[in-house]
Amino acid sequence: MLRVLITGVAGFVGRHLTELCRAQGASVIGIGRRKLSRHAQPPGLDAYIAVDLSEKQQADATIRSAAPDRIFHLAAETSVTSSWADPSSVLHNNFCSTHHLLEAVLHERPDARVLVASSASVYGSVASLKLPITEEHPLCPRDPYAMSKVAVDLLADFYAQAHGLAVVRTRTFNHVGPGQSDAYVISGFARQIAAAEATSSEHRGGTARIVVGNPDMRRDLTDVRDVARAYWTALERPRAGVFNVCSGSSTSLGEVLGKLGRLTGLSVEHRTDAALVREGDVMELRGSPEAFMRATAWQPELALETTLADTLTWWRMRLASRSSE
């Protein structure tokens, strides 16, 4: 049986990837920095190990004992806000965790295939004339988190080139779907609507008032389940490389609110909060998935309307379960 190791397994993508790996018949070992009760672990794990990958000895011991055939390295500190507050911590943790993991793979499981999840944030602000963004676009990070992902991205390429490890780097654009924290804007919209529904009779006759930054900002949105499938597909290939994972089209936040509004009996209104508009915000971020599609035949399957409907349903169920506790 194929042995899979997922770092950051309890995160948004990790939970969906665990489900997919199990469906593919793989044995799945998950790791994370915190100890988790069995109830808090993603369903389908064969084992969960609390590991601090920034400690080299722990990384070595984990790879040695897990003996994985494939590794999906998703673990990272991802908050841009926190990265501004403590840049050194984000840079250290994201870089060192990846470095120690790849060193452990080199010495303990050199034949394993590894996916290192990078981010579209490595490209920074891109002029509209340069869209869609391809993998050849210069890296130009604009915040400490993005800088840490550039470092991780280049480190992974170094281990592929210098040591011959089968490391695939994915630069993933915005991904959304059920199970995402409401700290992310679209999931936050869905939670606010579900909360407004909970206080309205039969989800009708009320109003959901949504606070938004700039509703004209456009993002390349891919369903998290399509992203998980992209990650699995990426390691079906025997060679290293770097690929954008994205839809190739962009949608404004205002359009997202319109689509969510059609999924509820409430009237959805939004107002712009200037405090949520940051100087230097990128107005449009849109990638080209062509290289990855050519290499793997992957393409997004879930329409944005399906993603939004499933996200809203997830929040309805989550809020209902909270109220019944």
Image (spheres, rainbow, N blue to C red):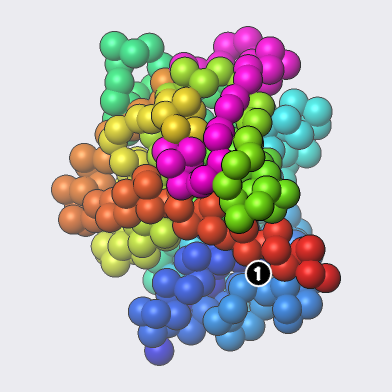
Does residue 295 appear in this view? Answer: yes
Direction from residue 178 to residue 21 in the image, left or right: left
Q: How many marks?
A: 1
Residue drawn where x is 66% and y is 52% of the image: 201
For residue 114, what is the image quadrant? bottom left
Q: Quadrant of the C terminus?
A: bottom right
Q: Position of residue 228 (x, y in %)?
A: 42, 60
> What residue does disc 1 label?
31
Residue stretch rendered in magenta on the structure: 259-283
The question of residue 278 being in magenta is answered with yes
User: Vertical placement of 220 versus 240: above or below?
Assistant: above
Q: Quadrant of the N terminus?
A: bottom left
Depth check, front residue: 143 or 165: 143
The question of residue 73 being in magenta is answered with no
Could you tell me the amino acid type at mark 1? Ile
For residue 40, what is the image quadrant? bottom right
For residue 41, what is the image quadrant? bottom right
Residue drawn where x is 39% and y is 34% of the image: 220
Residue drawn where x is 42% and y is 59% of the image: 225
Residue drawn where x is 37% and y is 45% of the image: 304
Depth check, front residue: 153 or 312: 312
Q: Position of residue 164 (x, y in %)?
A: 37, 57
Depth check, front residue: 226 or 251: 251
Q: Secondary structure at mark 1?
A: strand
User: Vertical placement of 44 versus 127: above or below?
Assistant: below
Other-residue count near label 1 (Cα within 10 Å), few / some / many at <14 / 14–19 / ≥20: many
Depth check, front residue: 282 or 114: 282
Q: Position of residue 45 (x, y in %)?
A: 58, 80
